[in-house]
Image (cartoon, coloured by chain):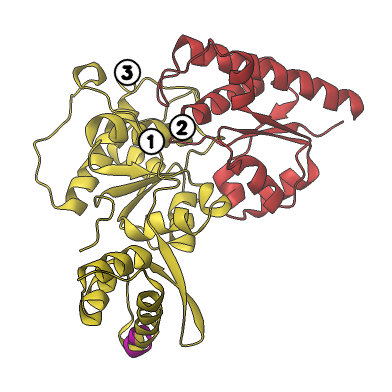
Chain colours: A yellow, B red
Amino acid sequence: MPVLPKRKVGLVSCSGEELAEGTLARVATLYVLEQLRPDDTATICLPLFLAGDDKERAFARFFPTIAIDGCAKRCAARATEKHSAIPTASLVISDLLAARGLKAPSSRRQMDIVKEPAANVVAHEIARQVDEILGVPRQPVAGLRAEESEAARATCSCGSDIPVAHLNIAGKDVEVIALPLIFEQAHQAGETFDQVFDQIRIYNVIPGEAELAYRQAIQRAYEAYCANAPHLES
Amino acid sequence: MKRRVLIIPCSGIGKAYGSVGREAAYQVVEELRPDVTETVCLSLLTMGDADAHAQVRESPTITIDGCPTACAKVNVEAAGGKPAAEFRVFDVYRAHRELKVRSVSDLGENGLAMAHILAEEIAAKVDELKDEG
C-alpha cells in the first residue's frame, strides 16, 4: 500500500463574503479544523478549485468531503462536484439555522465562536458529520469552549502532494490519483501488475464497463515506467 | 463614476493572510468607504454566476490576495474582469515585518493592524478610481 496522506475528511467552505452566513461557514469550519477534529480534517480554499491545478483538485477526489455553504446557491457543493467529485455530505447553513430556530449573526465581520451560538451549532454539526463519515464513535463535544482545548493551526491542502497522472484511456484523458506513487513503490517492492491495479482501485473509481480499458492503459504505463526506472539490485 | 468599486478578497481559509485580506475588505466596505464600495462572493464568481460576472465586468474591481496563487485576481480575470488594482497581503507584511499575524482564525492585534494598513491603502486607491471616473 503506498504511503499517501492520512485519510481525512476534506472541509470545503463557501466563505461567501457578501453574507454573514458565509463568515459563519468559514468560522465554524476553522473551529472544526483547529479545535474539534484537527487530526481528522483538512481544507482547501474553494476558489483554488478554479485557480489551482490537478493536485489541488485531486484533494477532493482523494478525501471524502463535506461542503459547507452559507446559502442556497451552494457554491461549495457545486464547485466540489464540478471540479472533483460529489461531496460525501453537504450542509447549507441557512437551512440548518432555520431548522434549529436560530438566527444568523447580524455582522459578517470576524466572529467569536464561543460567543456566537449559531457558529457553535454549525461547527458541532460539521464535527458530527466528520465522525459519521469516518465511522468514529465519539462522546458529544457540545459545550467545549475554545480556551479549553489546545488549538491546532488550520492549514490548507493546496500543494497537498497527492500525486496524479493523466492517461489516455479509451480515447479519453483520465486523471488517475496516486498513480506515480503507486508505480514507484510497487516497482521498488517488485509487486505484480495485479497488485498495482488493486491499489489503483482503492484511490480511483473505475467504471465496470471500462475496466479492461483501464487495466490495459495502466499496464502499458507501468511497463513503460519499469523500463525507464533505475535498475534495482536484487 | 457611478458604479461602486468592488473589493474582492480571496478569503483563503487555510492561510492567515487570507483572513487579513478578508478583514481589510470589510473595513473598506463597511467603515472606510461604505458609500462607494461593495463586495461580491468570490465563490459565486468562481461558479460562473451571471450577476457576479456582470458586476466584475462592469465595475472597477480591486482584488486582495493572501498567497501567490492569487485566487481573487485569477478568478476575476477568468470571469472577464480586469482588476483596476491588485493588492497582496504579503506586501504589507514586507513593509511592516513587526506585524506577525496570530492565526487564520484569530488575527490578534498585529493582524488587525495589518488589515487596517491594507484597508487604508485600498481606500486611497478607491478614491483615485472615483476621481478618475
Which of the two residues, A161 or A222, is positioned nearer the viewer here?
A222
Q: Quadrant of residue A141?
A: top left
Q: Residue furthest front?
A: A233
Q: Residues within 10 Å of mark 2 (few under 14, many from 20)?
A: many
Q: Chain of mark 2?
A: B
Which residue is under mark 2? B15
Q: Label 3's element?
A: loop
Which residue is under mark 1? A155
Tell me whether circle 1 and circle 2 mark residues in contact (CB < 8 Å): yes
Q: Label 2's element?
A: loop
Mark 3 is on which residue type? Lys
Is residue B27 visible in the rendered image? The answer is: no
Q: Chain of mark 1?
A: A
Is residue B37 visible in the rendered image? The answer is: yes
Q: Residue furthest right?
A: B132
Give the residues drawn in magenta, as a range. Answer: A211-215
- Magenta highlight on residue B100: no
Tell me whether circle 1 and circle 3 mark residues in contact (CB < 8 Å): no
At x 65%, y 24%, the residue is B29
User: Total marks drawn?
Assistant: 3
In the picture, measured across the screen, residue A167 lies left or right of residue A29, that is: right
At x 23%, y 46%, the residue is A130
Q: CA distance from mark 1 to mark 2?
A: 6 Å
In the picture, measured across the screen, residue A136 lies left or right of residue B68, that is: left
Which of the two residues, B56 or A38, is positioned nearer the viewer here?
A38
Q: Label 1's element?
A: loop
Which of the two residues, A61 or A214, is positioned nearer the viewer here?
A214
Tell me whether circle 3 and circle 2 mark residues in contact (CB < 8 Å): no
- Magenta highlight on residue A212: yes
Residue A197 point in image, percent of width and height: 26, 77
Q: Which mark is residue A115?
A: 3
Q: Chain of mark 3?
A: A
